[in-house]
Amino acid sequence: MSDTDPSQAEPDRNDFVRLFSRNAKSLYGYIASLVLNVADTDEIFQETSCILWSKFSSYDSSRDFLPWARGIAYFEVCAYRRKTKRNLLLTNEVVEAIAGDTHPSAAEANERELALSHCLEKLTEKDSNLIQLRYYEQLSTKEISRKLGSSIYSVYRALTRVHNSLLCCMERQLSAFR
């Protein structure tokens, strides 16, 4: 029999696997929204996953897992941006604005997903195709430019325009929820 208080016991690693697998897709999406580059997202997600595993003993199981994981992911995105010192498509200010509150409730996260779905449905066929190529088919901007017969610059410009359009639409949708 152990003398330690059960509420102070180290979290079970099975709990980590359960919580991580339940939230991995959302966490990956969160990182992708801050980075917008599949290769960078994959690398940051991998590093974040390792850190979450190593720091799981400090996780407070009375709180939601995803906000805790997103907080760690946000700092990993910032560290990666400093380390690579290359243009990752978004400025630090935009990353901070997108990251906003790294601890949204489940209801807020659901509202954001609904708003994004609504806004994606409102895109023109051309813009929807661009999003499809970039995020669902995970093509690089170089690959998209080749496929569409456009310059890389015009693809970047179009993606920036679509991102801004989606952001404005989502802000309008979210304000309607409140």
Image (tube, rainbow, N blue to C red):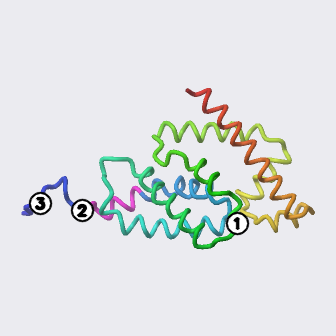
Residue drawn at x 64%, y 60% is 35
Residue drawn at x 85%, y 64% is 152
- Residue type at mark 3 is Thr
What residue is disc 3 on? Answer: 4
Q: Which mark is residue 10?
A: 2
- Looking at the rendered structure, the secondary structure element under dot 3 is loop
| Proximity of marks 3 and 1: CB atoms separated by less than 8 Å | no
- In the figure, 24 relative to 175: above or below? below
How many other residues sit within 10 Å of disc 3, few (<14), some (14-19) or many (≥20)?
A: few
Towards the viewer: 157 or 139:
157
- In the figure, 178 relative to 94: above or below? above
- Looking at the rendered structure, the secondary structure element under dot 1 is loop
- Looking at the rendered structure, the secondary structure element under dot 2 is loop
Q: Which residues are magenta?
A: 11-19
What residue is disc 1 on? Answer: 87
| Mark positioned earlier in the residue sequence (3 or 1) | 3
Q: Quadrant of the C terminus?
A: top right
Residue 165 location (% of width, % of height): 75, 42
Is 31 positioned to the left or the right of 87 in the image? left
Residue drawn at x 77%, y 37% is 122
Is 36 positioned to the left or the right of 159 in the image? left
| Mark positioned earlier in the residue sequence (2 or 3) | 3
Residue drawn at x 82%, y 55% is 157
Is 169 positioned to the left or the right of 52 in the image? right
Residue 78 location (% of width, % of height): 55, 62
Give the number of the mark in front: 1 or 2.
1
- Residue type at mark 2 is Glu
Give the number of the mark in front: 3 or 1.
1
- Is residue 18 inside the magenta stretch? yes
